[in-house]
Image: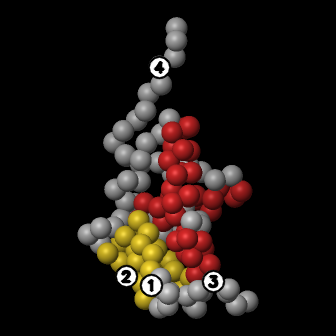
Amino acid sequence: MATTAPIPQDIKLHKRSKTLELVYADQSYTLTSELLRVHSPSAEVRGHGKPILQTGKILVAITGVEVVGNYALKLVFDDGHDSGLYTWEYLHHLSINQDKLWQQYLSALHEAGASRDPDTSVVKLVDL
């Protein structure tokens, strides 16, 4: 099955800025490690139909990038996560929708009373 999404001509891992740059024929996109981690296509994150909100990932970094066949990348993160295969189609989706997806993620964290910081726990006070 051929993909309809463009395939990057170049893929650059920028370790200092914790970003992955995807260079296409007409444009390039830079995705943060945190965005890629919290939107991993793995079952661990997707939750078999009910997504599991990822928290405390502000410091996460990509430590490895492996090409899988002619259709995807496997990203290895420093928190041990390495089970998602990012197809070219999914990477392009993340690239062109990253602002919207990021705002949705921040809203979900807020609604859950959760934090991007792994060292922060949000405590809600209840009227007694």
Q: Which mark is residue 125?
A: 4
Label whose residue precedes the other's in the sequence (4 or 2): 2
Label whose residue precedes the other's in the sequence (4 or 3): 3
Q: Nearer the viewer, mark 4 or mark 3?
A: 3
Q: Residues within 10 Å of mark 3 (few under 14, many from 20)?
A: few
Q: Amino acid at mark 4?
A: Leu
What is the CA distance from the residue labelled 2 to the residue labelled 3?
Answer: 19 Å
User: Which type of secondary structure does the marked residue at label 3 adopt?
Assistant: loop
Whether residues under marks 1 and 2 lie with C-beta atoms below 8 angstroms apart, the answer is: yes
Residue 15 at x, y percent in the picture: 29, 72
In the image, residue 6 above or below residue 98: below
Label whose residue precedes the other's in the sequence (3 or 1): 3
Q: Which residue is mark 2?
A: 12
Label whose residue precedes the other's in the sequence (1 or 4): 1
Residue 50 at x, y percent in the picture: 69, 52
What is the CA distance from the residue labelled 3 to the residue labelled 1?
Answer: 13 Å
Q: Which residue is mark 3?
A: 5
Residue projecting furthest to the left: 16
Q: Which residue is mark 1?
A: 23
Residue 24 at x, y percent in the picture: 49, 86
